[in-house]
């Protein structure tokens, strides 16, 4: 049915349903995540507004109808966009990312326009909703959607490649890797090939849709990417090559006469055409003109002021001729490598090396002509120069593709020949280590290198040679091999750590820097990092910083940063006073480069995380020992974003330690909260997230008055914005945690939060947690449940009614059954606060009037509160089906939950409700669990509260006689171990049980 024919409320309900579905589907979209998160943040705020509009009797005025039509239209547009982004190929979506964000921009603007048309003056909307509509209108009007920077970079590279008609394989490979990273596709061959094949099918779909412009664009992109390795299989490339090679014959083609330059009489490389219409080699004609000749050497026509135009057609013809002849040459000289004449073999290898150096496509031809097994065979021969040339040529081939590395390594005895060459003459050994290092970039080949007998020993020997570059390559290869504990043992036996340490400690400045860079650049396993540091590397690197220049400092810090990711190493660094050294580097603004300070900040952050780890010998370290050090480091938060993030994260983890009470107090004293409040609006999202988490840590043991004094309404608004829009659950939870830590009795804060629309946000988070059953972020739900408590305080009944009307009481009951213990505790406490007002809100049941003989029977009253009860009007626990979950909570092992549940249930036996409430607790089997909570050793303060509840219940003879024996032991223990009021009350109950006389000394 046309939505214009439906009632306004029904249309709005359908729009709400579509928006909710769109929000849910958008969470699964893998492209433009930031933009979709921003969009769904706005839509989530729109839903509560539309819900209230749907509940109102809204007139079918022109303005209202215009609002509904805009919302209906744009919701459908966004839903279609989300559906498309959820099912289309990722490369296709990347290519169309500008259109996607443009659609989001237009729809958001239209939503804003619709909000501006809502006739607020004529609608009886709540103050909070009115304020939210105005706020939403403003924020959506100003919203800006842009494609991610990474995607824009890829699009520009694609456009550049198409414009320049790039045929470079390396460019195509890099472009595909960029695309994979931008759209979140794994960078392995199969995943990228699958994505590329799907993109080609998208082009076929565009042709079927007769979208010619889109099909042409996609065809250009496919042609550009088809040069990449993943675009075809090795067999497909082999077949294409052989077909091309066989079509050329076996004899080279003579060059055409037009290929020769009339001046040099040699085949041209860069032919250019003059105004006379003749073509010359560029260098030759430019020299002719530079020598003062101003006429054409062939026609004698004046060349003064004439431009030289590239002869693209001729140049392409020359290149095609040269490539054809090169392919014939590569195919024809292979047999010469079997010659018994060493010089002929060397000349052939030299010729091949020159061709392979000249162009990547020639290297591919060498591989496809199956030269690799021949070259490996030469590598295993007895001629030194031939072995050296074969190693160099194989290394050149290995640089191109993983496929070529695999081909080389798979030839029988190939790796054994290379290892054997490590021990030979200097040049051959250097070539062998370079080839092994290149092959080691493939994980399975790396494993095989380590398995070859003698490989590690010879590599260690190579490290001890006087050739710095070869020693560095050997060192990097050994570091790669250190993934295996067995390999590390072999390294130790070969005294591997000795040359490494020697070069770090006593080598020249350049050697130290080179070795430190090797340590910094390698992707080491945790095991190898720990083994290296046990050898004394950390001490040597720290000595470099203490005694070195800026270059060695940078190399040493980079290495330490790499090694410090292992807690064991970081703890060793802490013991070596690394924290003080790093702090000095960060603090010396005039002497330290920005990049060095950034790495120092990252390393300090790693130390902080490790200081709090289980590896810290059971006792956490405190990195900053004095107030001055705390101040020195915190001042540096004003530096660039990278340093800001590292320092904030370091402080966050340090402030979470139990021993960091003084640090938290000092940070608050020096104005940390005031600064962190500002950082809640920081443009860098990573810095903002780190700042919010530290902010939360500082509020956990903060005096409530201090917090209220230093956080204003704007700050609360920034925190709520983070909760609404952030795509980081830990940041949202921290922001919610800050709100929770404000004093609940601070009415100004509560009023501000209501004005800013906090309540719908909190309710939505809790509702979402309940819908999921097992929420993805228990901590966020826990903090939301805690923040909600300030809106359920018993002294503000009107606010309680507002919260209850949102359906939160039934949700709180559900929270009793899942989530963290704190979530359950907060839910029980909120239910207790609601229940405190149930009796006064319960309306008396009206009796029959005498003259209405045939009237319906009077509605029965609530068995606890006596009057008419409901969940939303009187917050009745019985009506909410909360009693049984609360009783079950009494038996949980977490005392915080038991105590809160007990507090909630105790509201049922207050004053005149004692009889009915006790009966209900007995029926629900709650009395025995309450008695069990009186065990002092197990329950602590909870026992005292349980004692007060039991004292009231035992005023009734029925329950005293039924449960007195069960309670007696616990009561006796309380009189013996407690003091003061608790002891006296336990004695009073024992007197009720006739166990103690009323004149006992326990009173």
Image (spheres, grey):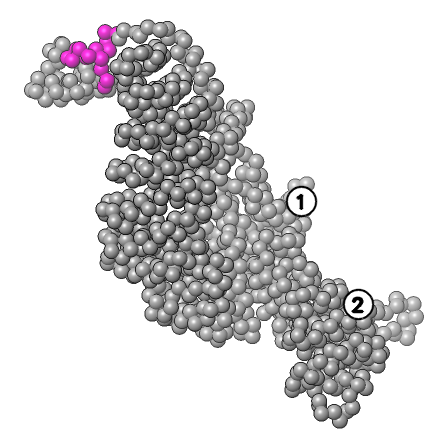
Q: Position of residue 447 (x, y in %)?
A: 46, 35
Q: Position of residue 984 (x, y in %)?
A: 70, 87
Quadrant location of the N terminus? top right
User: At numbered mark 2, what does the secondary structure look like: helix, strand or loop?
Assistant: loop
* Magenta stretch, main secondary structure class: loop
**Spatial separation of the CA atoms under disc 2 and disc 1:** 52 Å
Q: If you read the primary sequence from the N terminus, does the residue marked by circle 2 or circle 1 appear first?
A: 1
Considering depth in this image, is 550 or 467 the residue closer to the camera?
467
Residue name at image x 24 percent, y 53 percent: 548
Q: Is residue 380 above or below residue 813?
A: above
Residue name at image x 42 percent, y 67 percent: 673
Q: Position of residue 589 (x, y in %)?
A: 26, 59
Q: Which mark is residue 5?
A: 1
Residue situated furthest right in the rendering: 853
Task: Inspect this view and state whether residue 769 appears.
Answer: yes
Instruction: Classify mark 1: residues with Cα within 10 Å, few (<14), some (14-19) or many (20+).
Output: few
Residue situated furthest front in the rendering: 493
Residue name at image x 17 percent, y 20 percent: 283
- Highlighted magenta segment, given as a residue range: 256-270
Instruction: Classify mark 2: residues with Cα within 10 Å, few (<14), some (14-19) or many (20+).
Output: some
In the image, taking residue 647 as reference, residue 196 lies left or right, namely right
Q: Is residue 260 above or below residue 141?
A: above
Q: Position of residue 432 (x, y in %)?
A: 33, 29
For disc 2, the marked residue is 924
In the image, taking residue 882 as reference, residue 207 lies left or right, namely left
- Is residue 263 located in the magenta-colored stretch of the structure? yes
Considering depth in this image, is 373 or 87 the residue closer to the camera?
373
Considering depth in this image, is 747 or 450 the residue closer to the camera?
450
Residue name at image x 77 percent, y 79 percent: 968
- Is residue 802 located in the magenta-colored stretch of the structure? no
């Amino acid at each position: 049915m046309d939505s214009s024919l439906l009632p306004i409320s029904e249309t709005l309900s359908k729009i709400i349903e579509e928006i909710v579905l769109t929000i849910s589907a958008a969470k699964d979209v893998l492209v433009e995540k930031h933009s979709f998160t921003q969009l769904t943040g706005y839509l989530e705020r729109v839903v509560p507004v539309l819900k209230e509009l749907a509940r109102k009797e809204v007139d079918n005025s022109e303005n209202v109808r215009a609002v509904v039509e805009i919302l209906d239209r744009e919701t459908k547009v966004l839903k279609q966009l989300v559906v498309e982004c959820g099912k289309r190929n990722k490369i296709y979506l990347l290519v169309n990312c500008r259109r996607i964000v443009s659609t989001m921009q237009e729809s958001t603007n239209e939503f804003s326009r619709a909000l501006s048309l809502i006739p607020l003056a004529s609608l009886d909307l709540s103050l909070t909703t009115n304020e939210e509509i105005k706020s939403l209108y403003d924020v959506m009007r100003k919203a800006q959607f842009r494609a991610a920077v990474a995607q824009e970079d890829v699009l520009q590279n694609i456009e550049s490649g198409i414009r320049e008609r790039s045929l470079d394989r390396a460019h195509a490979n890099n472009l595909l890797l960029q695309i994979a990273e931008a759209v979140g596709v794994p960078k392995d061959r199969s995943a990228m090939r699958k994505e590329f094949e799907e993109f080609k099918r998208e082009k076929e779909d565009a042709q079927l849709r007769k979208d010619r412009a889109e099909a042409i664009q996609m065809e250009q992109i496919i042609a550009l990417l088809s040069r990449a390795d993943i675009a075809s299989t090795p067999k497909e490339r082999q077949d294409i090559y052989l077909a091309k090679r066989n079509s050329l014959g076996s004899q080279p083609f003579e060059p055409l006469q037009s290929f020769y330059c009339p001046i040099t009489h040699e085949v041209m490389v860069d032919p250019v055409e003059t105004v006379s219409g003749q073509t010359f080699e560029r260098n030759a004609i430019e020299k002719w003109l530079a020598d003062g000749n101003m006429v054409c050497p062939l026609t004698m026509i004046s060349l003064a002021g004439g431009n030289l135009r590239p002869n693209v057609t001729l140049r392409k013809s020359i290149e095609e001729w040269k490539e054809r002849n090169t392919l014939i040459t590569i195919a024809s000289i292979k047999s010469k490598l079997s010659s018994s004449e060493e010089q002929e073999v060397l000349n052939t290898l030299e010729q091949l090396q020159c061709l392979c150096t000249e162009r990547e496509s020639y290297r591919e031809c060498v591989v496809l002509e199956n030269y690799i097994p021949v070259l490996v065979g030469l590598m295993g021969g007895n001629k030194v120069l031939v072995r050296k040339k074969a190693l160099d040529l194989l290394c050149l081939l290995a640089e191109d593709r993983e496929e070529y590395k695999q081909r080389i390594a798979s030839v029988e005895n190939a790796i054994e020949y290379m290892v054997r060459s490590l021990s030979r003459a200097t040049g051959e050994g250097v070539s062998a280590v370079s080839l092994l290092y290149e092959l080691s970039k493939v994980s399975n080949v790396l494993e095989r290198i380590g398995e070859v007998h003698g490989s590690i020993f010879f590599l260690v020997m190579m490290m001890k040679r006087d050739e710095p570059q070869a020693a560095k390559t050997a060192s990097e290869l050994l570091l790669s091999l250190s993934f295996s504990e067995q390999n590390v043992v072999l390294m130790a036996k070969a005294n591997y750590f000795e040359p490494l340490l020697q070069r770090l400690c006593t080598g020249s400045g350049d050697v130290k820097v080179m070795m430190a860079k090797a340590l910094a650049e390698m992707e080491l396993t945790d095991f190898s990092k720990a083994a290296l540091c046990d050898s004394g590397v950390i001490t040597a690197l720290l000595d470099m910083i203490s005694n070195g220049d800026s270059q060695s400092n940078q190399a040493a810090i980079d290495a330490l940063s790499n090694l410090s990711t292992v807690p064991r190493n970081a703890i060793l660094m802490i013991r070596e006073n690394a924290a003080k050294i790093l702090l000095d580097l960060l603090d010396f603004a005039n002497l330290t480069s920005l990049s060095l300070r950034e790495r120092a900040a990252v390393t300090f952050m790693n130390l902080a995380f490790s200081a709090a780890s289980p590896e810290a010998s059971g006792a956490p370290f405190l990195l900053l020992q004095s107030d001055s050090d705390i101040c020195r480091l915190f001042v540096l938060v004003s530096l660039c974003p990278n340093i800001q993030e590292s320092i904030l994260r370091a402080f966050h983890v340090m402030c979470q330690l139990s021993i960091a009470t003084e640090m938290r107090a000092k940070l608050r004293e020096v104005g940390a909260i005031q600064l962190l409040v500002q950082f809640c609006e920081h443009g860098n999202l990573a810095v903002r997230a780190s700042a919010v988490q530290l902010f939360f840590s500082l509020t956990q043991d903060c005096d409530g008055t201090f917090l209220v004094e230093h956080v204003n309404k704007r700050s609360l608004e920034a925190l709520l914005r983070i909760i609404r829009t952030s795509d980081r659950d830990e940041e949202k939870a921290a922001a919610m945690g800050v709100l929770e830590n404000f004093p609940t009795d601070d009415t100004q804060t509560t009023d501000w939060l209501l004005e800013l629309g906090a309540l719908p946000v909190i309710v939505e988070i809790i509702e979402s947690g309940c819908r999921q059953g097992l929420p993805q972020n228990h901590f966020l739900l826990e903090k939301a449940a805690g923040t909600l408590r300030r809106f359920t305080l018993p002294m503000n009944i009107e606010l309680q009614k507002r919260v209850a009307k949102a359906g939160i009481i039934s949700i709180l009951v559900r929270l009793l059954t899942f989530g963290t213990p704190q979530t359950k505790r907060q839910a029980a406490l909120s239910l207790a606060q609601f229940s405190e007002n149930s009796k006064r809100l319960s309306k008396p049941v009206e009796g029959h009037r005498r003259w209405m003989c045939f009237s319906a029977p009077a509605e029965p009253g609530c068995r606890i509160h006596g009057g008419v009860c409901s969940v939303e009007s009187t917050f009745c626990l019985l009506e909410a089906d909360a009693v049984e979950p609360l009783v079950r909570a009494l038996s949980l092992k977490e005392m915080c939950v038991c105590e809160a549940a007990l507090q909630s249930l105790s509201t049922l036996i207050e004053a005149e409700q004692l009889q009915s409430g006790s009966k209900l607790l007995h029926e629900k089997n709650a009395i025995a669990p309450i008695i069990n909570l009186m065990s002092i050793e197990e329950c602590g303060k909870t026992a005292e509260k349980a004692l007060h509840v039991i004292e009231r219940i035992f005023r009734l003879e029925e329950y005293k006689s039924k449960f007195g024996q069960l309670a007696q032991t616990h009561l006796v223990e309380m009189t013996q171990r407690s003091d003061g009021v608790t002891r006296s009350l336990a004695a009073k109950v024992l007197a009720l049980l006739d166990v103690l006389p009323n004149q006992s000394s326990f009173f």
